[in-house]
Amino acid sequence: MTIDDVIAPSTVSAWDLVFAVLTLIATWIAYRFVQRVTRAGVARIGGISQNMRAVIVRVVKYLVLLLGIGVALTFLGAQLQPLITVVLVVGAVLVIALRGVADNFGSGVVLQTRKPIAIGDEIESQGFSGIVTELNGRAVVIRTPDGRTVHLPNSDILGNPLVNRSENGVRRSEVEVRLADKTLDVVRALPSTVGKVEGVLPDPAPDLLVVTVESERVVARLLFWHSPLIYTRVSSDVVQAVGADLRARGVNATVTSNTQDAPLTPPASI
């Protein structure tokens, strides 16, 4: 493609040149106007980060600028077919190259408008759990309990199960008690002990769930509610309080917040 294929000087008149210049002036005015209007419009939309607002404004204003330049070129005799071909090829390359970016951006808009999560929430997704520290056009950034920073792509957040542990404002935890004693009266008094621990909510009240009764062993779980982000500290305090209570009564027991099957625990005899 040569310059003659794009602009045919023999067909350009003085009026065409005037109209092209006026079009460029009008495009610049529209460019500035659309920029201000778009910025004001996205500012009214809740749940969108400042970074995403800037991206939306930038995309809209550049579309207006390119459209005005294209119209001005038509007054100068530009043949739009070669230009359209180039635009389509470049567009196809950009779509392929930026497909992941576009997916994450679109997913980010959904996340920040529908608000399934917010900054400060504790979430779990794709095997990672932590506190949300940032929502941007590419990823959800979380801080894990051990201090790591994890960037979870927005598209993966929407495409996989997402657990929000903070949305309801309360969270339930449990502690398992294994007693080398078949007397259930010992464990029935434990919910009151749990209720005295700082951080445990009185409503719903702590509850007791007996899961195993054997000839020489009783296994029970203490269920209690607390604020979402302090579960490790509250669980630790509950384990200590229940363990101290049982030791004070001379009961041989194991108290743990790890409710998996204990190793080297013999099966019940029948």
Image: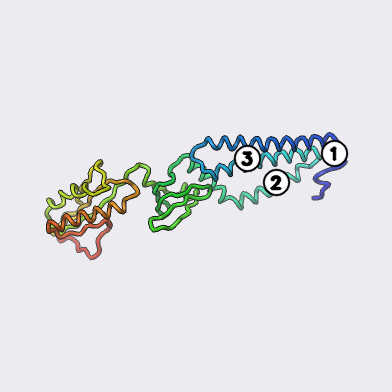
Q: What is the spatial separation of the Cα atoms under label 1 and label 2, in whole angstroms?
A: 24 Å
Q: Earlier in the sequence, mark 1 or mark 2?
A: 1
Please give the name of the residue rendered at 49% of the width and 49% of the height, measured from the top-left corner.
Answer: 154
Residue on which disc 3 sits: 60
Badge 2: few (under 14), some or many (20 or more) residues near its Cα, within 10 Å?
A: few
Please give the label number shown on residue 12.
Answer: 1
User: Which percent across, then down, holds residue 46?
Assistant: 49, 37
Q: Amino acid at mark 3?
A: Val
Looking at the image, is mark 1 or mark 2 nearer the viewer? 1
Q: Are marks 1 and 3 in contact (CB under 8 Å)?
A: no
Q: Amino acid at mark 2?
A: Val
Image position of 166 (left or right of 83): left
User: Which percent across, then down, holds residue 122?
Assistant: 39, 49
User: Which percent across, then down, holds residue 48?
Assistant: 51, 41
Which quarter of the figure has residue 176? bottom left
Determine the residue located farthest toward the bottom in the rendered image: 264
Q: Secondary structure at mark 1?
A: loop
Q: Amino acid at mark 1?
A: Val
User: Which percent across, then down, holds residue 149?
Assistant: 45, 56
Please give the name of the residue rendered at 48% of the width and 54% of the height, measured from the top-left corner.
Answer: 151
Looking at the image, is mark 1 or mark 3 nearer the viewer? 3
Quadrant into which the C terminus falls: bottom left
